[in-house]
Amino acid sequence: MPRILFMAGHRWPDYATVLPRALEEAGVAAEVSPDLAPDAVDYIVYGPAGDPAASDFSVFPRLRAVLSLWAGVETIVANPSLTVPLTRMVDPGLTAGMVEYVTGHVLRHHLGMDAHIVNPEHHWANRAPPLASERPVAVLGLGALGAACATALVSLGFPVRGWSRTLRDVPGVACHHGPEGLEAALGGARIAVLLLPLTPGTENVMDARRLARLAPGAVLLNPGRGPLVDDTALLAALDSGALGHATLDTFRTEPLPREHPFWSHPKVTVTPHIASETRPATASRAIAENIARAEAGQPLLHLVDPERGY
């Protein structure tokens, strides 16, 4: 019987019932607990509380794999004590939540809804927005989340350009890759959505030069990772009018410090890292499926490549 350490701090009450049930439904008889002796642990379900770099996986001599509850693994992938396979979370609930957030905020900015929701002077601006087909959207990152969001936007009529570090094929999306492809994807886009993983190659990917590639007055959405954006360059672009608005869900420091200029900037919407959340019911089924595969001697799904960082 495999023993599974739930190493995700305060989240255990949310998983205490649904994870054992999902394992049973997957045909895995296992012991799951947040409190197991290190020499008894076969698998770790991981969602760090506190400093993830402080986690020492070398104390688990039987450890076979670490299964992340998060889609992003930048806080753990470089841990030198992690020598077993690491999987990232690909969860239908996580994907659905991100699609809802991205499409909602894209439509919000496309339709100019803010001007009607907050209109203290009762200004009658009798001018309809353009159709979606006239507003190109760039989606940076075409993994599970990015591809799903890009597909949803295509279904609404937006011309979508996607970019990834390696070439992807997403039906209806003009897919680009590599440095030249990034410039092409961003060029003249009216809305840009950031859904890249955070790696040394993607940090500050939206710097002053890349922000300037967008159409004048464009909107930036970042539900991906805070360090994808150069904050100083972003504020400068907003202040100059080169960028019309930024809706930000992820930040370099979280919670976002109360004194940070994003909070008070009239062209910034702060959402508190709620674009999408790992849902215990669907995440538990994803974890159970992977452990069942491992127990059957099959390859794990959604393995992280340590060289690429995701």
Image: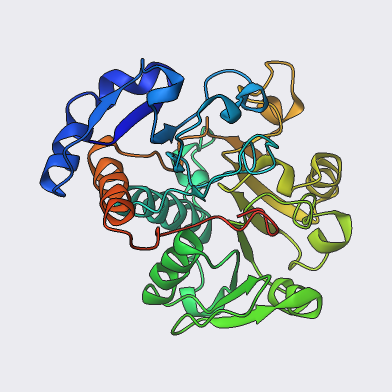
Does residue 216 appear to the left or right of 295 in the view shown? Answer: right
Q: In this view, does 42 lie to the left or right of 59?
A: left
Apparent side of residue 29 relative to residue 94 in the rendered image (left or right): left
What residue lies at 60% left-to-right and 24% top-to-bottom?
A: 55
Instruction: State the scheme by which the image is colored.
Output: rainbow
Q: Using residue 296 as the reference point, say whether residue 113 is left or right of it.
A: right
Q: Quadrant of residue 243?
A: bottom right
Compared to residue 140, the image places residue 49 above or below, namely above
- Depth order, front residue of 251/36: 36
Residue 225 image point, x, y percent? 63, 44
Residue drawn at the location 51% of the way across and 44% of the way down: 114
Image quadrant of residue 151? bottom left
Identify the image quadrant of the N terminus. Answer: top left
227 or 116: nearer the viewer? 227
Residue drawn 30% across the image and 54% down it: 92
Which quadrant: the C terminus?
bottom right
As displayed, is residue 107 above or below residue 251? below
- The one of 84 and 245 positioned closer to us in this rendering: 84
Residue 240 seen from this side: yes
Residue 51 rendering spot, x and y as whole percentages? 64, 21
Where is residue 258? Give x, y as percent.
Answer: 68, 16
The residue positioned 18% from the left and 32% from the top of the image is: 20
Q: Which quadrant holds residue 138? A: bottom right
The answer to whether any part of residue 131 appears in the image is no
Decide: is 4 above or below 111: above
Callout count: 0
Front residue of 155 and 96: 96
Give the x, y percent position of residue 63.
Answer: 46, 36
